[in-house]
Image (cartoon, coloured by chain):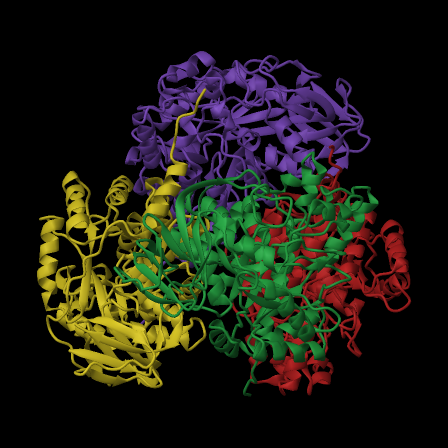
Chain colours: A red, B green, C yellow, D purple
Amino acid sequence: MSLIIRGATVVTAEHEFRADVVCAEGVITAVGPGLSAPADAKVVDGTGKLLLPGGIDPHTHMQLPFMGTVASDDFYTGTAAALAGGTTMIIDFMIPGPDGLLAGYETWRERAEKSACDYSFHGCVTAYSDKVAEEMGVLARDKGINSFKHFMAYKGAMMLPDDALLMSFNRCRDIGALPMVHAENGELVYYLQQKLLREGIKGPEAHPLSRPPELEGEAANRAIVIAAVAGVPLYLVHTSAEQAVEAIIRARLNGQRVYGEALGGHLAVDDSVYRNEDVVFARAHVMSPPFRPKGHPEALWKALQAGHLQTTGTDHCAFMAEQKAMGKDDFTKIPNGCAGVEDRMSVLWELGVNTGRLTPSEFVAVTSTNAARIFNIYPRKGSVSVGADADLVLWDPTVQRTISAKTHHQNVDFNVFEGMKVAGGPSVTVSRGRVVAADGKLLAERGAGRYVPRTAFGPAFEAAGKAKALLAPRAVQR
Amino acid sequence: MSLIIRGATVVTAEHEFRADVVCAEGVITAVGPGLSAPADAKVVDGTGKLLLPGGIDPHTHMQLPFMGTVASDDFYTGTAAALAGGTTMIIDFMIPGPDGLLAGYETWRERAEKSACDYSFHGCVTAYSDKVAEEMGVLARDKGINSFKHFMAYKGAMMLPDDALLMSFNRCRDIGALPMVHAENGELVYYLQQKLLREGIKGPEAHPLSRPPELEGEAANRAIVIAAVAGVPLYLVHTSAEQAVEAIIRARLNGQRVYGEALGGHLAVDDSVYRNEDVVFARAHVMSPPFRPKGHPEALWKALQAGHLQTTGTDHCAFMAEQKAMGKDDFTKIPNGCAGVEDRMSVLWELGVNTGRLTPSEFVAVTSTNAARIFNIYPRKGSVSVGADADLVLWDPTVQRTISAKTHHQNVDFNVFEGMKVAGGPSVTVSRGRVVAADGKLLAERGAGRYVPRTAFGPAFEAAGKAKALLAPRAVQR
Amino acid sequence: MSLIIRGATVVTAEHEFRADVVCAEGVITAVGPGLSAPADAKVVDGTGKLLLPGGIDPHTHMQLPFMGTVASDDFYTGTAAALAGGTTMIIDFMIPGPDGLLAGYETWRERAEKSACDYSFHGCVTAYSDKVAEEMGVLARDKGINSFKHFMAYKGAMMLPDDALLMSFNRCRDIGALPMVHAENGELVYYLQQKLLREGIKGPEAHPLSRPPELEGEAANRAIVIAAVAGVPLYLVHTSAEQAVEAIIRARLNGQRVYGEALGGHLAVDDSVYRNEDVVFARAHVMSPPFRPKGHPEALWKALQAGHLQTTGTDHCAFMAEQKAMGKDDFTKIPNGCAGVEDRMSVLWELGVNTGRLTPSEFVAVTSTNAARIFNIYPRKGSVSVGADADLVLWDPTVQRTISAKTHHQNVDFNVFEGMKVAGGPSVTVSRGRVVAADGKLLAERGAGRYVPRTAFGPAFEAAGKAKALLAPRAVQR
Amino acid sequence: MSLIIRGATVVTAEHEFRADVVCAEGVITAVGPGLSAPADAKVVDGTGKLLLPGGIDPHTHMQLPFMGTVASDDFYTGTAAALAGGTTMIIDFMIPGPDGLLAGYETWRERAEKSACDYSFHGCVTAYSDKVAEEMGVLARDKGINSFKHFMAYKGAMMLPDDALLMSFNRCRDIGALPMVHAENGELVYYLQQKLLREGIKGPEAHPLSRPPELEGEAANRAIVIAAVAGVPLYLVHTSAEQAVEAIIRARLNGQRVYGEALGGHLAVDDSVYRNEDVVFARAHVMSPPFRPKGHPEALWKALQAGHLQTTGTDHCAFMAEQKAMGKDDFTKIPNGCAGVEDRMSVLWELGVNTGRLTPSEFVAVTSTNAARIFNIYPRKGSVSVGADADLVLWDPTVQRTISAKTHHQNVDFNVFEGMKVAGGPSVTVSRGRVVAADGKLLAERGAGRYVPRTAFGPAFEAAGKAKALLAPRAVQR
């Protein structure tokens, strides 16, 4: 089965150029002007459109058991929705249970078999021990997991204290894996939650009050210093607060290798949603970190533009209104999470490219290529080049659409972008050389996705190691 | 017994003016031009000299039991040396033992009876419990202690975790006391100390390597965020690292009431001392935070000039070479501390006023008046005004001196300012109306100093309370 | 004629204390508890109220001939309104005509004779020449003018190019006068004005579009660098844009002596006024710099709180609707200016003290004392101390009032604070020992005000000189 | 004539990969593993080495007539030296004479015919007029010049005032050309030069004193604001001062498209050279901006690492000691300029890659690819891809060398990197498919270089246009 896309303008993170693209056996086999199609090739007309590397969402939680329920989008519905929106790969968070990381990995592999698009996993370190260290090594060396998230929030559950963070960051450095953090000061969140409940403020409006932006800034700053001591790069997931952005900028301007991710939601929505008179609406927006006061989204955009944030994700973790209602009497019991995997690309294009904040190439970088590089799967993913996986999106910059839960493919009854008008969207999505969505029709195939292992010791490690060696303590000659 | 100082230029934190000053019964009774002397008055000629409020050193540790030994300057020798240098009041840190804060207070009162100059105490919270909270309240209400220090370093000893910091800051807010922090991330210090020892780097050169400036910056930033959550002002002792200064500046530029103190030593000396070929010399400089790399002292100066640091102290904690030698095989066992109470005023004048960084009025502010205001003893201390305690320094801006342990009055065999040439110094020091040093002759009297209680709820508390009320979480009407 | 104010809490820039205050012959003769009143003394009961130094407005333009008309408040009506609001001194800008600075000084002296409160003048350098340099010297040495404003805007009129700014700043340094700047890049303003007119955008909404905040930031930054080269302190009038604030902060954090003034209007009002559907309303707000987009006022407040702005003024320059209508077909012809001298104190109290941004002492500093120090008339003005001019305000923090042009004393038919509710205001105003306003009744006397000469070489000059000497170019020995 | 390079690790700005590279007819015809060589192909063994895109030096002045003499490296000697060091393309500044830009273009084309490597030209706007505007349009549309430099320094010669800068930036925007600036405040430079000469400080040590870093910061900030008003991207040549870097960072963090270039010299050398006891040595370093005080080079490095500076050049403008001696009695007459085109790549590798500041890919970006993109010749230049010009460097990271004027190929008797030990350098340089340097032997051919025209409206223009349109002034509906 082969495919040729003719006449489009190819857009990569580096530049734009006119070329035909031929795919066969799931990979790109030719890129160039005036290519002849293989005999059996399906022909897609790209005239007047852009051909981009498929989107990579580096932050999803499909069918996650969380807070007493399970996220409503499973690996099939969630990845199918992703394809509908032009995202052809997700990196999901494998959160281990008491059986440990290896057992968790197996569970996730099994759950993900139904995926319609390619997928990979980040590990999570929810406690630190010799066993954890050992299993981290196995995952990095043998199982294709080169990144591990650490929670600085969720006191009493997954929150790690500083000494565990340091030990785990050290371990990451030694096994060539990228440490990631959910940066919020969990002690202070817990205190504010209890204080609000004591004062009788129990609705969803209390959620952002319990997690002010300063707490994210503090944790981000702390994680960055711990990473500096460990001599390892660091990746901050779902950076949402200006204070966290500033911590990242300070570190980067000081030569430290720190990466940050912004979510489509945080780039588009502010915290007024929590004060909406419709409490169901307010509850539907509960996720952590919360949507932030006006001003913060603009700070995220500016950091994306300046290169201090590199990736965009969604933290896709869908819950139905019925599930959200578990917290109707206590905001701390509302399952945390919002959907987004389907609309990220359109929202980024509308608010990014249509406003002049981003060039099309920069759009490709922040929706696909940068994630591929940071997580060490470039150029297999995130590029339009011979030999790469044929994950492509034919993008129509003129198509207009209004985002709505009524029409989306995500298995959830709410959409944080509801009513947003976007110009620009996928005309055809290609996953491993197969057309999986075209002209609004979703052709996703259950189980067609493949696991993408990621090699340890990504490109920044060698340089980080040299920089570290220069700073390392050393004996003074007397 | 009365006294008149004639013909000097009075310098206050506000302005300079020509006036005579009359003192009687330990207080200032008249300030003005051409005053007539009381019949019995001792007359001091101030012609060509400046008359300043006596210096206040808000950070000393006299005869402190620490790290298995006791600081060599006791309350008498240390305060006598202070008077020799123009400092007429100290605020010493009362560090409680297992008997608790009230017992500690009594111990300190008793130890301090031999003081030659006036004194007051900060409390220290080295663990947090209901008993501690109760005793903090008693000290603030009944004993004149309106400030409490918290250690973020010294893991396994006095270090407090974030939840204890928060509870204690909340308590401080409620009792009108100013929380203070020693800001260094103790977890990371401990890790680096152990790493250095494991790697065989055991000399004093390891001391700064185990406490890089970033760790102070991290802790300062964290303490500031905790104080913001608690809604209380905050005072950072011995700010030494540019990163900590920047954290303070960020907070202050955001409207938070945060104060910072610089030490005379940190303003004048850099970390090259630890790499000196003479290991005894290197060891003599071991204190925490350590002296910092070049660039940091300049950052402290600029923050002092811009008003982001308000006070200067010394962390005076003297140890003899013999005591320092306890750590000859292990830098973590070197008693931490350096002397400085005697020379702070001269060093600040030389590096501050003689370079144009500070006006004489600004010098008065950072060596005396600001401390008096922040710790709520102004205008009794820190001013030249009728009714104020007659603590005065007649300052000769022309006198030249080379600082040396050979000539200083401190009971210690080392001086971190050894060999520094300074122009400007005290000609006459007056403590509570009595001449206690004149023309290089020290006339300090053992036991002449008095305890100065400090009232709770200083000037910033009301404003901080209002600001907090505006930010406090509140119910949303639906 | 003498006066005693009994039982109030005196608030100075340094502290608060209970004291009676006695005034005689226009000056304060006693400050202390339980004073006995002179026989003939008028007694004012201050119980439950605060007694502050009278406000100083360092930026007014009374009866200024400008843009083809004359400001509607003359020195009498304007200063009477000032007294009604608790301001007891103004510093007006003497803008010379073709006859030069000395002639301008005489004109201003004559115009100001009708003033009801004390006054002083800043000079203005609207072109630079040997004659100007000579007359600047005479004004500084003999006429009590120790500050000169320079316009970086108003191309084709008063705008000075960089070389003239440098020469004039050098001259200021030599004569001990403080250079001031109106910081906006006049070239870029002119270009944008012409562009807007060409595009047919001629209403008052074009005014802020022609003067974006960036242009103020640029000019502020440039003036600061020129002052650094000249080795002279600098004062920026009516700082309104965050970018200018940031330029000031950068300089101050680098040790340069730069001062900034915020206007009451810029602290309270944003640029949405220019888009009001009522064009007369919009026009009434035309002043330069214009009111700024949301966010800028908050930046000014934070800089005031942190001490990077030191003074507050009004740029009081009143024009009637009829005068404003001169620009009905061309926004560049609308006379620039708004009133404010009467309400500054109340607005600052409401938005500053009532919100916890400022303590009462800090309020005194930014409305009075800091201006007195910077312009070298402290403690004669800006203090409550024996020997100072008896300019006092008995402040009632509980009185409530709604600001309105219907009730104000200013001779203008508009008020930019219209409808603003303020709690806190003057109960009694005392000017040179005379009650000039009490309980809402204005008792101002035409011509009662006196000229206040200001001595050159204020307190910062010596330090700035030393700092400069250290940086000065010097020969290298080979 | 064809060529195959076998077994190297190809390093691009995006990633590293093992591949053989085949070149024919001056372009790259194949990139991939295990390629078969064309029959006639010259075979180069790349085993153990890196294969990079040839360096692009975006800032040279070959055989420039300047300050009464002519730069000693002409287009042949200079480009041959470039090839020796691994740089395969230069962009030289065409500085027009009185005959105008088109005449200047012809002169430069003719002079450059002798070049050994490919070349392109930036234009320079040294005055602004209708004729200049017209000729800028012709150059951009027909002659391949899409960038124009403007001098903010050199008062009385090429310095442009603000209104001319604005008009020219507007013109650049309309013709799709990138405006560039030499950012130093020429008025202030001139003043300081005259002041130094008046004070008898005439040697080369006066050069940096006359051009302090603050003056570059001021001009950079001003140019950036003018570009914002014009709505056009901006490129700052030879950014050398931390203050200028900070201005760029501020703009970029605010979403403005501003680019900055660092010179190899400024990254490696500080201003102590001007105080060297050997006046000939000091004089040899005179260039503008001058080498900067310690701290500035580190600021440049950090900005390069963080992506706020994108390119590295040399400002190669060589003068012999004899020429430099023209200014022996007056530092303002020393011909400004230093060589560097030969050593930039090695210096960047040594100080960048060997220290861990840069990964090899980042090295490629800042020495080649970013310049190709910004100046719109990517991927023809700056890439290793099929169809690109075969400009390649086989880089040996292990080779050691000490830089010296004794061994360099530049036609000048001095080298600012004299004595610097570097590990890493070109093993083979390929220009348009021809081996032009190999194993230390230079095989450059006079006249082999070709002119590379550059198309207007580079990739950032469309986005900048959209962003501008959003900000543009527009009528308010009343």
Task: Find residue C25 and report its image quarter.
Answer: bottom left
Closer-to-camera residue (A135/B240) = B240
Closer-to-camera residue (D435/C228) = C228
Residue A391 % position (x, y): 73, 53
Query: Measuring 40% from the left and 21% from the top, which residue is drawn there?
Result: D203
- In this rendering, the answer to whether D251 lies above or below A72 is above
Query: Measuring 74% from the left and 71% from the top, which residue is drawn there?
Result: A154
Task: Find residue B68 and report its image quarter.
Answer: bottom right
- In this rendering, the answer to whether C231 lies above or below D205 is below
Residue B31 % position (x, y): 32, 64
Q: In which quarter of the image is the C terminus of chain A?
A: top right
| Residue C413 seen | yes
Query: Measuring 35% from the left and 62% from the top, which residue is drawn there?
Result: B41
Question: Left or right of B280: which side holds A75?
Answer: right
Residue B163 % position (x, y): 70, 71
| Residue A456 seen | no
Closer-to-camera residue (A202/B249) = B249
Closer-to-camera residue (C269/B102) = B102
- In this rendering, the answer to whether B367 lies above or below D89 is below
Query: Measuring 45% from the left and 19% from the top, which residue is drawn there?
Result: C478
Task: Find residue C19 and report its image quarter.
Answer: bottom left
Q: How many labels does the image show?
A: 0
Residue D191 % position (x, y): 31, 33
Question: Left or right of B323: which side holds C149?
Answer: left
Q: Which residue occupies the extreme front position in the image?
A: B40
- In this rendering, the answer to whether B325 lies above or below C413 is above
Question: Left or right of C190: which side holds A95?
Answer: right
